[in-house]
Amino acid sequence: MTTHDVIRTQKIGIMGVGNMGQAVLSAFIDSGIVPRENIIIANRSERKLKKVANEFQVRSVNTNEQLIDESNVVIIGVKPQDLYQAIEPIASSFHEDHVVISLAAGIPLASLEKLIPNAKKILRVLPNTAAKIKLSVIAYSSSAGATHHLKWIEDLLSTMGFVVAVEDGEMMEAMVVASSSGIGFVYELMMYWQEWLGERGISANIAKQVTTKVFAGAAAMAEAAPQVSFEELLRKVTSLKGVTAAGLESIRELEIERALRISFEKAAMRDKELGQTWIKID
C-alpha cells in the first residue's frame, strides 16, 4: 500500500476553519489525494461553518466531539488563545489511534501531549498562508508515537508545499518567525518597493506587478541554483561600482541586517509569550 493509499483511507477532521483552516482544506481537496467525502469540518461560528461547507462541498458537524469521534486525523486549527478552552473539556474524546495535528503558534508539543494524554500521535505543524497556492513552507515536530506514520503524514502535509521536520523548541520557534511570519515580513518589504516606484510616477498597479516579478524572479533564480549560496548569487548580479553596488553599500551602512534581526527576535519573543500566557497544564 502506497502512502497515497493510506491517506485515502483516513477520515480527516478540521476543527476551526479560519484562514489557515481553509488554506489547509483547499490544499487537501485540490491535491486529489484526499477524497472530499473523507473531510469533516467544525467551527465555533455556525454561519462560517455553513459558508465554508457549501464553498468546499464538504460535510460539517455541529460539535467538536462529533468531529473527533468520526475522524482518524484531527487537525486543530483554532487560535492559540482559544486552544485550551476548546480542547480541555473534550480531551477524553481522543484515543491512541488518533493522529492529532495542531496548527497553533506558540503552543509547544509537550503542552499538547499533557493536554491530550490519550493521544499518542501528536504533531505540531506550522504552515504559512501560501498553503492556499501550494507554496507554503510547513515545519513540523512530532511525538515519539507518530514516528511510524510520518511517511504518509509528510505526504499529506506536502499537499500544501515544502515540508521540513524540526525539533520542537528553538528550531520550531525559528521556523515560526522565518516561515509563518516570514510572509508578512516579505509583504512589508514589497510595500516599500511599490511605494518608492509610485513616488516616481509609476502607477500603483504596474508598481505592484514590477515588485512581485522582482521578488518572484529572485526566488526562482535561487531555487534554480540550489548549490549556489545567496552570497554568490548576489555577487553575480552586482557590478563593481555599479548601480546595485551603490544601493547595497547604503543598505549595509544603514544596518538593515541588524534591523531585520531585531525584528526576528521580537517576533520570536512574541511566540514565546503565546506559550507562556496560554494556560499551562502541570
Image (cartoon, rainbow, N blue to C red):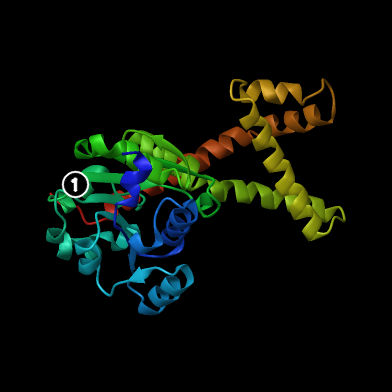
The N terminus is located in which quarter? Answer: top left
The amino acid beneath tag 1 is Glu
Percent across and percent down for residue 83 are 27, 60
Q: Is residue 90 above or below residue 113?
A: below
Residues packed near mark 1 inside 10 Å, few (<14), some (14 to 19) or many (20 plus) = some
- Label 1 SS: helix
Task: Please give left or right for residue 59 compared with residue 236 in the image.
Answer: left
The quarter of the displayed image where residue 20 is located? bottom left
Q: Is residue 280 above or below residue 249?
A: below
Considering depth in this image, is 73 or 198 the residue closer to the camera? 73
Q: Going 33% across and 36% down the picture, which residue do you hit?
A: 151
Question: Across the whole image, how many numbered discs are drawn on residues?
Answer: 1
Residue 270 showing in the rendered view: yes
Percent across and percent down for residue 108 are 28, 45
Considering depth in this image, is 140 or 184 the residue closer to the camera? 140
Considering depth in this image, is 22 or 200 the residue closer to the camera? 22
What residue did someone put label 1 on? 113
Q: Going 50% across and 55% down the picture, which residue do you hit?
A: 30
Q: Residue furthest right?
A: 201
Considering depth in this image, is 137 or 153 the residue closer to the camera? 153
